[in-house]
Image (tube, grey):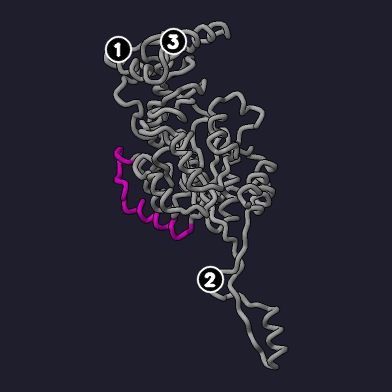
Amino acid sequence: MLLPFFTALRDAKVPVSMKEWLHLMEAMEKDVLGSGPSRKVDDFYHLSRAVLVKDEKHYDRFDQVFGKVFAGIESVSAGEDLTTDIPEDWLRLLTEKYLTDEEKAQIEAQWASLGGFEKLMETLKERLEEQKGRHEGGNKWIGTGGTSPFGHGGYNPEGVRIGGPGKQGRAVKVWEKREYRNLDDQVELGTRNIKVALRRLRRFARQGAPDELDMDATIDGTARQGWLDIHMRPERRNTIKVLMFLDIGGSMDAHVKMCEELFSAAKTEFKHLEFFYFHNCLYEGVWKDNRRRHTEKIPTWELLHKYPADWRAIFVGDATMSPYEVTMPGGSVEHWNEEAGAVWLKRATQQWDKVAWLNPSPERYWNYSPSVAMIRELVDERMYSLTLEGLEKAMRALAK
């Protein structure tokens, strides 16, 4: 019964060997999961992943195959309730309100007078203290489908999204524990031109142990000495060192494929590459693994002290966010940041003077987002579109 699962994993290029598969079969025969009604598909998911997957970067492809093969039997656990202590029925979207442009304009004018970010958070605190039940389609309480700035599924120019998916992309803060997956560095590139563009950022030198035959010097020495005179030399390597900061989640979900292609090409082309994830704007912490980003953050100060000024810094993100996320302490949609994102970006550009921001959004849309203009100013106008032309311009600038 499980053979289709094995073949599907192999077809998806998850490197599962026959030895590992036999270990899984042995575990099943010994009733590691127990027997009877206590055995669940969720338990088999964790067991099979632990036995079959050797590298965490294959977790995402494993999850896709597992979900496809065992669809309809039992859903794999999606994790804990992510809406803190707010009752679930308050956030269940039953109806959705559709507004005209005139009605949206009236709502924007109404909430423009609320008083900005600090007043918004203060009002949320008051609502949590006062609200006693569920609300649907209203304009004040925490609920769904209305024009209140608190909840989800409705419309408000600036609000706090609590539970449910984002639809308008206007939330200035998101109250939930969002999970993102890591970018796959083994993705098949749609075009080799990305690699060609990245190769413009190269500076070769011969460093390290002399382990490569120097044919020209060997021929010359042999001719002069009259006997075989072998000369060795260090391998010619690209000495450029690159830090890559990748925006993940939210509006960047639409650009995952393009970013995976860039990430895969960068890991091939740059011998000295360190990468880190962030969300929307650079703050006091970044992370290497999206599954552990809440528990294993790396202080940004640590990077500023660890990597000297000769490293090149490449930021990849659409720079589309609430302006509060750039300018305000506490403006991050996911946590309470003690210092504004602009402060951390300025520190980064002061530490690494060779900086480029690659934006996957079409350049014609940049002027519609105030935050894009802010980020461009903070990186001294060194923002480039994530196109082949933009990549070539960015690599030329970084190579100077």
Q: Could you say where residue 54 lies in the image, as x and y percent from the top left? A: 44, 55
Marks 2 and 3, how far apart in space?
A: 64 Å
Residue at 63%, 77% in the rendered image: 213
In this figure, what is the number of numbered marks?
A: 3
Q: Is residue 30 above or below residue 117?
A: below
The secondary element bearing badge 2 is classed as loop
Q: Is residue 227 left or right of residue 304?
A: right
Residue 208: mark in rendering: 2
Q: Residues within 10 Å of mark 2 (few under 14, many from 20)?
A: few
Residue at 70%, 93% in the rendered image: 226
Q: Nearer the viewer, residue 369 or 340?
A: 340
Residue 131: mark in rendering: 1
Q: Could you say where residue 125 lies in the image, as x and y percent from the top left? A: 31, 18
Q: Which residues lie in the magenta part?
A: 17-39
* Magenta segment, prevailing SS (helix, strand or loop): helix
Label 2 vs label 1, nearer the camera: 2
Q: Nearer the viewer, residue 242 or 276?
A: 242
Sequence-earlier tag: 2 or 1: 1
Q: Is residue 28 above or below residue 374?
A: below
To which residue does mark 3 refer?
A: 113
Q: Nearer the viewer, residue 309 or 287?
A: 309
Sequence-earlier tag: 3 or 1: 3
The secondary element bearing badge 3 is classed as loop
Marks 3 and 1, how far apart in space?
A: 22 Å
Q: Residues within 10 Å of mark 3 (few under 14, many from 20)?
A: few
Callout 2 touching callout 3 (CB < 8 Å): no
The secondary element bearing badge 1 is classed as loop
